[in-house]
Amino acid sequence: MLNSLKVTSTLSDETRFSIYQFMLQEKKSFSVQDIADRFHIHPNVARLHLTKLTEIAVISSEYEKTGKGGRPGRRYKAEEKGVTLSFPKRNYDELLEWALEILTEFGEEANNVGKKICYKKGSEDMEKLVLSHGKDRLQLTFDERLELITEAASLIGYVPLIKETPDGKTISFAVYNCPYNNEIQKHSTLVCDLHESYLKGQFDTLFDVKDFVQIESMTNSCDYCTYRINV
């Protein structure tokens, strides 16, 4: 098991965390030079960051054979399952598994109750975020609302994109770093329903949402979960 303090210490570096988020989003392998160019840092610094991320198993590395002779270079790629922190006497993963098993056993009625609770939680969390910025939700401009939803989503890893339509604005985004990736293998439908309800709660708190539609899902072998919201 990974040392939790080592994981948090490694990811506490802002540049290193940004590199990890970038690699998660792109879902492909990179060389040291690729990362150095992307983040405008010296290759030796990029190599150090990549080595540190490899040590905590959030990215993997392998040698690339070019067929041109010479020493093969390393390629680095983010691990899709990510990393789980575990502290003594706080086995939240096991507790989550029990809760999902219970909801599954009780069927559709429990699923509906769960979605209502998650929707409420999403709305409450957004209200707290608005208050933490000293804002009045009813007086927020559209750009301020967009900044808040982007901030709320920073750890999940989506950046909303805006498109003007004859009927209003369309917000689209892709979740490339699902916080529940480890659970969707066994409880895909339930977990996705609950997570989507949470996201709806956040968006409904900020916007007059007309449609909230999932376009792609990781459970269908897609790289991302993508959504379209008409406001």
Image (spheres, rainbow, N blue to C red):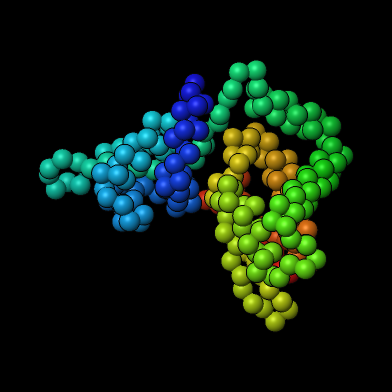
**In the image, 163: left or right of 190?**
left
Between 64 and 121, which is closer to the camera in this rendering? 121
Between 185 and 31, which is closer to the camera in this rendering? 31
Percent from the top left, x then y, of residue 200?
Answer: 75, 55
Residue 51 position by quadrant:
top left
**In the image, 198: left or right of 65?**
right
Q: Tell me if I can see residue 225 in this picture.
A: no
Percent from the top left, x then y, of residue 147?
Answer: 63, 62
Is 101 rendered above or below residue 148? above
The number of callouts visible is 0
Q: Tell me if I can see residue 213 in this picture.
A: yes
Residue in the image at 48% along x and 51% along y: 25
* Residue that protrudes farthest toward the bottom in the picture: 166
Residue in the image at 46% along x and 28% along y: 6
Say which quadrant the C terminus sits in. Answer: bottom right
* Residue that protrudes farthest toward the front in the picture: 134
Residue 190 position by quadrant:
top right
Residue in the image at 58% along x and 25% along y: 86
* Residue that protrudes farthest toward the left in the picture: 69
Between 50 and 44, which is closer to the camera in this rendering? 44
Percent from the top left, x then y, of residue 132?
Answer: 71, 52
Percent from the top left, x then y, of residue 13?
Answer: 44, 41
Is 164 rendered above or below residue 155? below
**In the image, 191: left or right of 220?**
right
Is 68 rendered above or below residue 137? above
Residue in the image at 66% along x and 26% along y: 92
